[in-house]
Image (cartoon, rainbow, N blue to C red):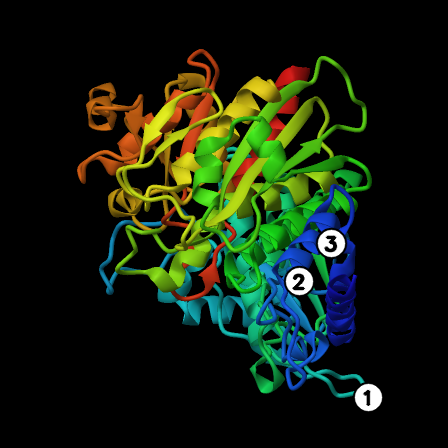
Amino acid sequence: MKFMNCALKSLAMMAAMRSASGFASPAALLRRQGVVKQAASYYYSNTRSSSSNSLSATSKMDQSFPTWSFDNPCLAMEWNELIPATLTATTELPAESDLVIVGIYGPAESDNDDDDAAAPVVVLEGAVKEMDETLGGMLSEVINDNAKTFKAGAKAGAMTPTIRVASSSSAGKSKRYVVVGLGSKPADDDDKNKSNGFSLGKAIAEKLNDETKVGTCSVVVPDALLTTAAFDISSSLYAALYSDNRFRTGDKIEKLAEDLTSIQLVGTDMTDDVAAALEAGRQMANGIFTTKDIVNAPHNVLNSLSLAATAQRIADESNGTIQCTILGKEDCEERGMGAYLGVARGSETPPQFIHLTYTPPNNSKDNKKVGIVGKGLLFDTGGYNIKTQMMELMKFDCGGSAAVLGAARAIGALAPEGVEAHFIVAACENMINEKAYVASDILTASNGKTIEIVNTDAEGRLTLADAIVYADKEVGCDSIIELSTLTGACMISLGKEVCGVWTKDDDLAKELEEISKDTGDKSWRMPLEMSYNEQLESKIADLTNCGTSYGGAITAALFLENFVDKKKPFAHIDIAGPVWSDKTGATGFGARMVTEWVTRQGQSKAE
């Protein structure tokens, strides 16, 4: 009990230390499904008595931010919150906006790079034309003065310099105007508006952050864009204003758009659907924040226990739409998850097999049941085949689980009908100790397949094997997608902005391709070359866990095919490249894709 009391005191300190910063208390993260019980057991069995001159457990946790103590791991990961500014829609331009952003469509972009070519003529229409006339043609002037860079609005997200107009009011505060390009006008209202919506939302966010002392902002946009892309504008705007301040102190803390209180989108024909789409976009941004938080968190904060606590919090805050089940070591042993547990033997914290179940408000036995599996390696050293490069980035090896859990948070809030979704993560680390698995070991997965380990740095597919079997056999999902930062080979093939998709199912491949285009999470279908299975042949087991150095991304996908029903729609999605940006850190990649895929399963069932 002494050790548990120390742990609870540490949690209380964590809550107190962050209450003034807007972070939610982590104590709520450690409820239900045995997370507290397992953590208490871990503390009791692993903590030794301190000598008389040692620091107390409480003072050990008295740091600029709470991580682990010397003896004990961190039990909770804090969450960054969205900016508090509201985003609404209106039919009238507010009189007192500090910043007015005016969106215009441009002509089709030209392939002519000739600097001497005449700039296209911009014809302002409707409310924008009236505003320009009121301002004495200042909008037209700034557009023409910046014709080369602004491209007459044809480049979505491009902005003119800010115009300041003196106020005639007694307060004397000037009003600022800027023109933003919406891209070339689509022939069909749905054709380009979604991608233009993403660009507009991001551009608005960047401008709001660049401009100082902006409390209120109005954005004038065409009705066609607002009615079809309100969700995308909202989600990208909020998501772009992400700043991870959990581990910063003092003047290092970055507050984005800190004076902002409200943003209003101005059109001529507002409907309740627009307001609902804006709120749904905000919920999607919450999911993206969760995805970024998980990938950004260092390993001394994020381990299997704190990731399980994060999943539990997602369920707790879902208004009852999501239930959380955490399988511990004994539960996994009963299911024969030898591939997953083989990797987990090297972890400091016990294995946590996370299963979030989303049930729609109007539940029905006819709901489509889908599985979404995410790779949950909280840190990957490579094991005894230790990595020789990129070790400092291996906290992002949980990018698949981050996308899956971020999407789960969004789905819980959006509550799509017609689909029951199962979000599954086998969480652990790939570390080195006296128990860690080694090359030449034989592991047995939960479907009975035996696996010869030829490289301990091909560990993610081992954890995924048991997670996929669980989704297929125990849960009985109708179709399954899996996301993972699985191979460097995929990064070499597709770079850092595009994920690879491997599937035998042409309908699933087409669906994911369409979703990729709609969400901006770029993907490319890759080949499943069956002859490469020869690389996975073992002399003493059913298969090896790794092929040769050639076609590594393909052989990884082929390996996973051994753990799912051959007739079941299944896709492996390797997100190793786009999950991380060297400039900004976690990108949030995959959360939108998964959310949209789950939502469409319910829609297809209704149709």
Residue type, label 2:
Glu
Q: Position of residue 365 (x, y in %)?
A: 74, 14
Neighbourhood count class around disc 1 (C-alpha, 10 Å): few under 14, some 14–19, many 20 upward: few
How far apart marks 1 and 2 lie (CA) works out to 45 Å
Q: Which quadrant is the C terminus positioned in?
A: top right
Q: Position of residue 262 (x, y in %)?
A: 75, 65
Report helix, strand or loop for mark 1: loop
Mark 1 or mark 2, which has the lower sequence index?
Answer: 2
What mark, if any, has residue 29 been given in the picture? 3
Residue 333: image quadrant is top right
How far apart marks 3 and 2 lie (CA) works out to 9 Å
What mark, if any, has residue 78 been given in the picture? 2
Residue 148: image quadrant is bottom left
Tags 3 and 1 in contact by the CB under 8 Å rule? no
Q: Nearer the viewer, residue 428 or 566?
A: 428
Neighbourhood count class around disc 3 (C-alpha, 10 Å): few under 14, some 14–19, many 20 upward: many
Residue type, label 3:
Leu
The image shows residue 74, relative to residue 33, as above or below, that is: below
Mark 3 or mark 1, which has the lower sequence index?
Answer: 3
